[in-house]
Image (tube, helix red, strand yellow):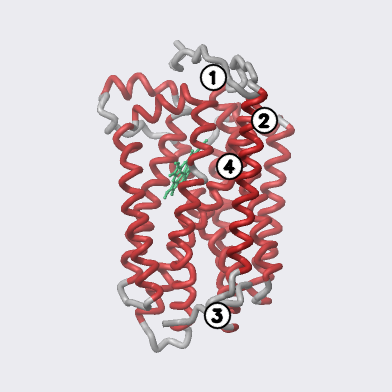
Amino acid sequence: MNAFPAIDPIPLPAPIWLFKALHIVTLALHFFAVELLLGGLLVAVWLSFLGSRNRRHPAATLRLTAAAALGRRLPIVVTYVINLGVPPLLFAQVLYGRALYTSSVLLGAYWIAVIFLLMGCYWHIYRFSAFAESGRNAAWVKGLVGWVLAIIIAGIYSTNMTLMLRPEVWASMYAASPTGLRLPPHDPTLLVRWLFMLTGGFWVAGIWMIWLAGRRVFEDPVRRYLSATGGRLAVVMLLVQGVMAWQVLATQTPGVRETLFGAPLYLGSAWAWAGSAAAILIFAAWASIAKPVSKAAGWTGAVLTLVCLLGAVLVRDGIRDFTLLAKGYDVWERTVVTNWPVVGLFLALFVAGLGALAWLISVMMRARPVAERAT
Ligand code: HEM
């Protein structure tokens, strides 16, 4: 029996490839922000803890300044996490609604809890940011609570995105309890998927530190500390995430792996992903030694990171499509009646929105820098 609900008879108003392209691009941007948050927050907490534990340590001021620099920017990162999460959620619902709605209902209590967990997480990040900037000893505790809430949210997302691929367990889960409080039965792909996202956060945070080192708002020793520490962190955590990536692929069924690497798009994406990860590894190793303080180094890291995340998101998309296909759900099998005027209007507004965003960022970058010193 096919467990997927019937296809919505209303046709899609735009080509499926367009929805998929928009979904992949916006999801890569969401993941960029998520990784900055998951990694950057814990790194800031750790530096704040080390710095405040022993203020006479020669590196204490550098640690506290670096923690405050990250902490100051984290509330802004959260706004990007949320706003860049909405578009892929809408596109995912259009493309995979029959699977995603079902799993979201089955996990109802946890899914709805995300809103409250997110509010708690955001509040703690604001407190951490303020405490870290004023150099208070207890700052790291606030940050740690915020981080724990963030990884719980990430866990709920991973659980839902995994359950949507398992129509075979839906009926028994609902029969056992329709309250939305029941967690799905064990799935070997879940833990590694979640750890893949968490470990990725730390190397992205390292690249972020190299980017921050290019900002003239910090004094020279802080900039060199940021780029050297960021480079070292990125090297180690890229290798750890590489192991996780291997595990993610190893836990897929042989059929999914074969079809995935037999498809030129996903094979190419996997190469782009691996190639950019290798380039980041070399770049970060260089940064850990050369301690660059240039904007060019920061942007190099940022662009490579975006390419790497795009590659990973594409491979992830292929895994989902082939897993669902093997269970009778073909994402391409939909009636499409394209409403071109609406599509045109949407794209024009989308481009205008991106232009407005780029302009806002350029205004921010041109603003007169305010020195950020240790407190
Ligand atoms: C602290 C807040 C958040 C964290 C830590 C977070 C983290 C994550 C993680 C780890 C995933 C990947 C799950 C997986 O595939 O294993 C994910 C996916 C996703 N997140 Fe977020 N997220 C957050 C907030 C949000 C918000 C507020 C939205 C939307 C309003 C959102 C929308 C999405 C969507 C749509 C996906 C997956 C889409 C797909 O698979 O097609 N996220 N998020």
Residue 40 vertical placement versus 225 (above, below): above
**Of marks 2 and 4, which one's residue comes earlier in the chain?**
4
Q: Provide residue 34's location: percent of width, then percent of height.
A: 49, 51
Q: Nearer the viewer, mark 3 or mark 4?
A: 4
Residue at the (48%, 81%) spot, across then down: 373
The image quarter in which residue 353 lies? top right
Q: Quadrant of the C terminus?
A: bottom left
Tell me, for residue 344, which label it has, or none: 2
The amino acid at mark 4 is Thr
Query: Image check: 13 left or right of 374?
Result: right
Q: Residue at x 63, y 61 (%)?
A: 362
Measure how far apart labels 1 and 4 are at the Cα level.
23 Å
Q: Which mark is residue 26?
A: 4
To which residue does mark 1 refer?
Answer: 329
Whichever of labels 2 and 1 marks the residue nearer the N terminus, that label is 1
Q: CB atoms at circles 2 and 3 under 8 Å apart?
A: no
Q: Quadrant of residue 57?
A: bottom left
Q: Nearer the viewer, mark 2 or mark 3?
A: 2
Across and down, in percent, residue 302 comes to: 64, 59
